[in-house]
Image (spheres, rainbow, N blue to C red):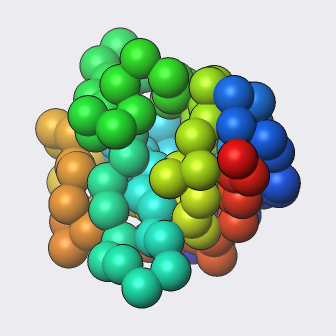
Amino acid sequence: VQLQASGGGMVQAGGSLRLSCAVSGHAFSLYPMGWFRQAPGKEREFVAAISWSGYYTYYADSAQGRFTISRDNAENTVYLQMNNLKPEDTAVYYCAAPGGRPYGELKITTHEQRYWGQGTLVTVSS
């Protein structure tokens, strides 16, 4: 199973970025997906999750109203559109997928994830 995250970069506060995560070797369309982030010196934290169908989404308070998670099951890809970025959004962003039974509920904790992407760095300057 491979998760390849991309789309990170450096942006000024108020700007936007769109992260992508291409998944291979996994029954992508049957599982919920999530995005997490880890800032320097901090623990990895939940950002957003999406159900296997794409119908249900859930966001951390810090992401609500600014970030949008989506997926394209035909392309085995999950996205994170980030708008109105703030310096405190600076972190390495990881996509993640659980294992276990398919069609499960959203997974929003790190220990529920089985597979992780390599991370993509987002830097927001003030």
Please state the horizontal and vertical placement of residue 98, each as a whole percent of the image.
Answer: 32, 60
Place of residue 65 in the rendered image (x, y in percent of width and height, measured from the top left): 41, 17
Q: Does 110 sit left or right of 16 as displayed?
A: left
User: Which residue sits at x=83%, y=54%?
Assistant: 10
Q: Is residue 112 above or below residue 17?
A: below
* Residue 55 to residue 125: above or below: above
What residue is shown at x 35% (from left), y 25% (from top)? 64
Q: Residue at x 63, y 25 (%)?
A: 83
- How many numbered marks does the figure carry? 0
In the rendered structure, the answer to whether residue 83 lies left or right of residue 89 reads: right
Quadrant of the drawing holding the N terminus: bottom right
68 left or right of 102 in image: right
Most extreme residue toward the front, as rendered? Answer: 126
Residue 94 percent location from the top left of the image: 54, 63
The answer to whether any part of residue 72 appears in the image is: no
Image quadrant where residue 56 sits: top left
Image coordinates for residue 53, horizontal then vertical, percent? 39, 22
Residue at image position (75%, 30%) is 15
Q: Nearer the viewer, residue 45 or 52?
A: 45
Q: Quadrant of residue 99?
A: bottom left
Is any part of residue 117 visible from this angle?
A: yes
Q: Is residue 71 left or right of residue 41?
A: right
